[in-house]
Amino acid sequence: MLAMALLTSAVYYSGLSGPFTLDDNSNLLGNKAIQINSLDSTSLKNAAFSIQSGPTHRPVSMLSFAINHYFAGSFNSTTPYKITNLAIHIGNGWLVFVLSLLLIRRSQSLMPDRDNSGLIKKSTILFSAFIAFAWSLHPIQLTSVLYVVQRMSALSGTFVLLSLITYLLGRTRIINEQRFGAIFVFALAPAMGIVGVFAKENAALLPLYISAIEATLFKDEKPWHLWNRLSKRTKLIILSLVTLAVVVACYWIIDITQSAYRQRSFSVGERVMTEARVLVFYISQILIPQISNFGLHHDDIAISRSLINPWTTLASVLCLTGILLLAFRYRSRLPLFSLGIFLFIAAHLLESTIYPLDIAYEHRNYFASFGILLAVGQLIILLGDRIDRRLVLVLAAAYIFLFASVTLLISRNWETDISLYTAEIRNHPDSAILNFEYAGLLEQYRKHDEAITFASRAISLNPDNIAFRIFLALLQSRNNMAIDEENTAITADLLKSGTITPTATLLLGRVMACIADECSSLISAAERWTAVLAVRKNHPRKLGQYNHMHGVVKYYQRDLLSAQNSILKAIEIYPGNIPAYIDLAAIYSQSNQTEKAIKIYRRLIQMDADQSSSYQHKIEALSIPRKK
């Protein structure tokens, strides 16, 4: 397995010094809590719970980033973080080998006299090695290694693999009446699964993985012999109750996620239909990876509006149904093939069903791809019963070489941010998000005309995206171009009831910062936008933020009274808004309301009593007489 580690390192080498990207910026570079200088308990605790992603906040993953930062010393280079990701991935490759070995041996024990099963003992090591090599070198794993923050997927996978290995060891010990088997099954395996959930929540699917293993490899063992003794009627009743519980759970999830769906361009039904096509897409990419189909974003995948729009929706549903029926039909004759299909489907039940997430990401297949490769592996070994085994080995080696080659080529694209996005745009020209992000990158390199071209293209691909329109106006103002009045008007209309994404809010903040410096031509548009937001129904914190923004714009229009009133309203709506107090104190000072300015200053000192916030220097910079 040393060869696997060396080969995996070689194919990823080119991308190990590549850029941070996308969520790396908010979760890592912009996260002061994980940029620790000591390993004391307070620093580690603050780092572990420093983001709001998911219900668990993913403390295991965030703790790993904090420790990584402590030893790296900074975020000046991505290499220490990507090397850590690579080490985790290589370790997981070893775990995949061990898990495959245990699964094969268990399968062999079910059919010791049936050589035509393709699971001949001398093939066990080669079969396991094939799966481990293929899984480790497959290009679908690349974003979990080179996209730094996706370590979350890899770490979650680590504990899922450890849990399954532990479970299989314990289950086998129980069957053989050996000691400590129950501890493995009922204590150690669940404990590792729980740790995995705190790395990323999809480890919560572990019970389904174990159920799939039980249904294919342990279906005749205790306690399942009791199930086999039940009458068909009793089984039907139990299955009906389970189905009803699943339907109720899905209805409950859909109900609580409706507000999130209002921020999406698709309904829950449209998402589920689209995901059928996405799962088929994933399977095709796992089986025969095509470089042009890989990418950071897949928003260029059309949404399924019905089963026949596009027609591939119904075809995909039928394809998945057929695969599942085959897996169920051959679960006794080809248990590992069936298990692989069940694992793949189970691994996508959180991120590829009813939750209002983005449609597709490759890292969602970090564990799921193991299922497809397990199924393929058994079929390849079965092929050895029909043709010369040496030819089968050559074909398997060629298959692995294909994976390694594609991963190597994609990894080279990750050498620089420009090379990465050039390749991404070439492969996904109709991705609105990629055009938007590429425009931002080009602006950083002062390629202003090209940046505006790609920002405009992003808008043409997704006209209702508020962030794209704000960014275009920002680019035009920064480059001393006339602000597109039509774009300004459409943006104002969209802000009345459209989806305001975190990116849009972030860009509005950048507009506020820019009009204070070089974007005076944007003040009129900003006033129009923030006036709409200031009266829109929203969460108090957001509404307070938007009223504060409106006050800032009024300040730069030299309307101090309106600015004062808007900021007072912002504070009334959300009293914890420290930046609003800072700006209010400055306005009071400039309008000679000294006593009020001093009062606000004292309030700020109280609010920032621990002097640990990022606003301390702004508070101290206020030009207010320090009266007692």
Image (cartoon, rainbow, N blue to C red):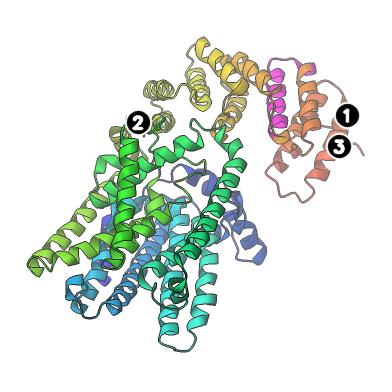
Q: Which mark is residue 596?
A: 1
Q: Earlier in the sequence, mark 3 or mark 1?
A: 1
**Residue bearing mark 2:** 308
Q: Is residue 563 visible?
A: yes
What residue is at 68 percent from the left and 18 percent from the top?
Answer: 531
Could you say whether the residue bearing mark 3 is in a helix, strand or loop?
loop
C-alpha span from label 3 to label 1: 12 Å
Q: Position of residue 61 (x, y in %)?
A: 52, 59
Q: Position of residue 131 (x, y in %)?
A: 27, 64
Q: Position of residue 20 (x, y in %)?
A: 43, 46
Decide which of 135, 319 is in the foreground and name it: 319
C-alpha span from label 3 to label 2: 71 Å
The magenta segment is: 542-561
The correct choice, above or below, for 1 with respect to 534 in the image is below
Q: Where is the N terminus found, in terms of image quarters? A: bottom left
> Hey, what amino acid is under mark 1?
Lys
> Hey, what amino acid is under mark 2?
Ile
Does residue 479 appear left or right of residue 145 in this picture? right
Whether pointer 3 and pointer 2 mark residues with C-beta atoms closer than 8 Å, the reply is no
**Which image quarter: residue 432?**
top left
**Which image quarter: residue 566?**
top right
Whether pointer 1 and pointer 2 mark residues with C-beta atoms closer than 8 Å, the reply is no
Q: Is residue 560 magenta?
A: yes
> Hey, what amino acid is under mark 3?
Arg
Decide which of 91, 496 is in the foreground and name it: 496
What residue is at 48 percent from the left and 89 percent from the top?
Answer: 179
Q: Nearer the viewer, mark 1 or mark 2?
A: 2
**Residue bearing mark 3:** 626
Q: Where is the C terminus found, in terms of image quarters? A: top right
C-alpha span from label 1 to label 2: 65 Å
Does residue 164 appear left or right of residue 520 in this picture? left
